[in-house]
Amino acid sequence: MTLSRPTKIWFDTHYDSQSSGLYCIEQIKERVLDDDNATEVRDWRDADLVHLNTIPFRRRDLGVWWSSKPMVVTQHGGYHWWRSRHELLARPDHRIFALMRAIFRVTSRRPQRIGFSTEYTRKLAVERGGVPAELTQVIPLGRNESYRDREPTATEDPFVLVVVNNRNPRKNVPTIVETMAEMPDVRFVLPGKMWGEYPGELPDNAEVTGYVSEEELIGYYNRAAALYLPTLYEGFGLPFVEAMACGTAVVTTERGSPLEVCGDAAAYVEDPMDAHEHAALLRRLIMDDEYRQELEARGIERAGRFSWQRTADAYLDAYDEVLYGSEGTEREDSAEPLADRSRARSE
């Protein structure tokens, strides 16, 4: 795919922190700018099109929102749409979430195209957030090619990898800690700074590494017996794709998007809060080589459906349609059904 005409694009990468959303938009930008007709501009006022990192709702978005610039958005997650209205009203911070929903309901009418990484998050936004369905499109996120199966799973000293970057309730951290306590003879490797700041006491088998480089993380993925991420809600879940690409079995829940992203390449717990059940499934993966290897093989195949280049190609199609009214050419190698680049239906 290539843009029909020379196009100046402003990317919303002006974040104060290294969020996962920033990481994703930077990956997309890098590959979009490989297109001969795409040029990045530093000021949105000079752009033919702006690509935002979320539906505009912050004060700094007001100038772009009030302008007439054609707008494409990558919408991450949608946690504020996840809970039902009844559940929101029961929360002490329900006013904040209600306000966010109201702002998103208004501002979501501004972009010409909004890309969601899964059908699950798209439907939440349409059904609970009032986002116009005709503006939405499912565009899966990708993975770097450096995430691949480089070395065998460690079976002499097996460990479980947990990749969680915050203590948001949806990450189900208390259940993760309970599961570790259920398996005192198994190492749990916990990369990232979050665990170093954990306010409670962790079991002795929790190996807190602190910050690790991407190369070190890929090494952990490769050697781990399983990635354990019993999420209560996940908009997409990059660790799932990264783990599968590295030949690592995934243990998760069917809540949110994991089932859509992982398909039959993951093992799913029935009760997201049952640490005893989680421990039993993890033990099976550690001890049953045939079962684990089957999931590893499925995961490698599944991960092949995701790439940042495909994600960028889908956005190039969207740019072309928004600016020039052309659909672009459908690619035979798109990751169906996730990489359907047609406008999502509203059924």
Image: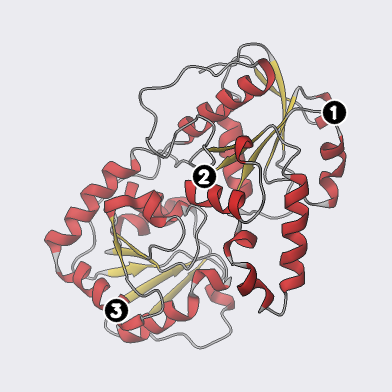
Q: Secondary structure at mark 1?
A: helix
Q: Earlier in the sequence, mark 1 or mark 2?
A: 1
Which residue is denoted by mark 3 in the rendering? Answer: 277
Q: Of the residues shown, which amino acid type is indicated by label 2?
A: Ser
Q: Are marks 3 and 1 in contact (CB under 8 Å)?
A: no
Tell me where residue 30 sits by quadrant.
Answer: top right
- Closer to us: mark 3 or mark 1? 3
Residue 318 drawn at (x, y percent): 59, 26
Q: Earlier in the sequence, mark 3 or mark 1?
A: 1
Which residue is denoted by mark 2 in the rendering? Answer: 117
Task: Residue at 41% x, 79% y: name it.
Answer: 273
Q: Of the residues shown, which amino acid type is indicated by label 1?
A: Arg
Residue 178 drawn at (x, y percent): 40, 84
Task: Residue at 32% x, 71% y: name it.
Answer: 270
Question: Residue at the bottom extreme?
Answer: 201
Disc 1: CA contacts within 10 A as few (<14), some (14-19) or many (>=20)? some
Which residue is denoted by mark 1 in the rendering? Answer: 45
Residue 227 drawn at (x, y percent): 35, 63
Task: Using the rendered image of the protein, determine whether residue 150 is visible from the camera's viewpoint.
Answer: no
Towards the viewer: 193 or 305: 305
